Image (cartoon, rainbow, N blue to C red):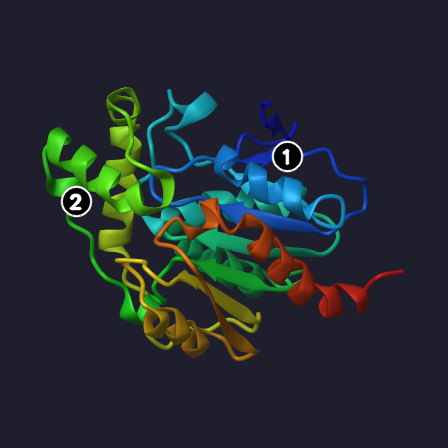
Amino acid sequence: MPTHTHSRTPWTRRLVATPDGAPRLVCFPHAGGSASYFRPLAIALSPRVEAVAVQYPGRQERRAEAPLESVEQLADEAFGALRATLSGPFAFFGHSLGALVAFEVARRFEAAGGERPRWLFASAGCAPSVLRRPTAHLADDATLRAELSALGAADRGALSAAEIRALPLPAIRADYRAVARYRADPAARIGVPVTALVGTEDPIVSPDDAAAWARHTTAAGAVRVFDGGHFYLDHQVHGVAGTVLETLAAPLAQISP
């Protein structure tokens, strides 16, 4: 089933029909990822929470657009779109690169004043203060494809030759370059609670890396560990949905009519 475009911006996709007035979880994809990656999570959260996914330029129906090459650019554009379209309570969920983009968008909401996310879920992402610098974007196409296949093999099964050839390499290179260039102030903090989620076998993010997200919030911080690798979410979607619903129950109840 295709995702649905919000009429006012190409930046967000409504993944599953959800009753009007449901709180929203805005999901930010990983490097090379697209909005549709979060459809299983959206199904698991519905109807209590509506998952709305961010669609970066350079993939799926935006594939004709040039991908952006910095976290700051992605955050600036996403913030502008979300600020114009979000209403009611909302929270953020970012996977890998998406965790950094979500963090920066949260910073922009706070700087602007007014409504801000109720929570940030940082999934499979190193905290800004311990961020590792990828170099895969510097490799040739064959090497990059091999690295991407190996990264997802433990979670998704070996990618087929056709799937490997179909990988959106320009977008992936741009996303990896964005992470490599990102330099956050180690003291950067948000007043939004942060829950870091990480897989037990993630080759990129360790539980300690995930725990370091607590340094970047003046509110509550927590870590949840799931079986799996960097794409643990593929097989742990119901557990993750349960964590999100349980975590958001109290803050959303406080503002419900």
The residue drawn where x is 12% and y is 41% is: 138
Confirm whether residue 133 shows in the render: yes
Residue 218's disc number = none
Compare marks 2 and 1 and give the one earlier in the sequence: 1
Where on the picture, by quarter, is residue 256?
Answer: bottom right
Q: Residue at x 24, y 39 (%)?
A: 148
Residue 136, numbered circle: 2
Mark number, residue 14: 1
As measured in the structure, the alpha-carbon distance from the residue carrying label 2 to the one carrying label 1 is 31 Å
Q: Say left or right for 203 vs 236.
A: left
Depth check, front residue: 197 or 27: 197
Q: Quadrant of the N terminus?
A: top right
Q: Position of residue 180 (x, y in %)?
A: 22, 53
Position of residue 12 relative to residue 48, above or below, is: above
Q: Locate the C terminus and report the quarter of the image it occupies.
A: bottom right
Q: Position of residue 44 (x, y in %)?
A: 65, 45
Looking at the rendered structure, the secondary structure element under dot 2 is helix
Three-letter amino acid code of the residue under disc 2: Ala
Question: Callout 1: helix, strand or loop?
Answer: strand
Q: Nearer the viewer, residue 249 or 118?
A: 249
Q: Residues within 10 Å of mark 1 (few under 14, many from 20)?
A: many
Q: Residue 34: x and y, percent? A: 44, 35
| Left or right for 213, reference 253 | left
In the displayed structure, 89 sits above or below 255; it is: above
Q: Nearer the viewer, residue 133 or 163?
A: 163
Place of residue 20 in the rendered image (x, y in percent of width and height, measured from the top left)? 81, 41
Q: Is residue 172 left or right of residue 7?
A: left
| Amino acid tagged 1 | Arg
Q: Is residue 227 placed above or below 163 in the rendered structure?
A: below
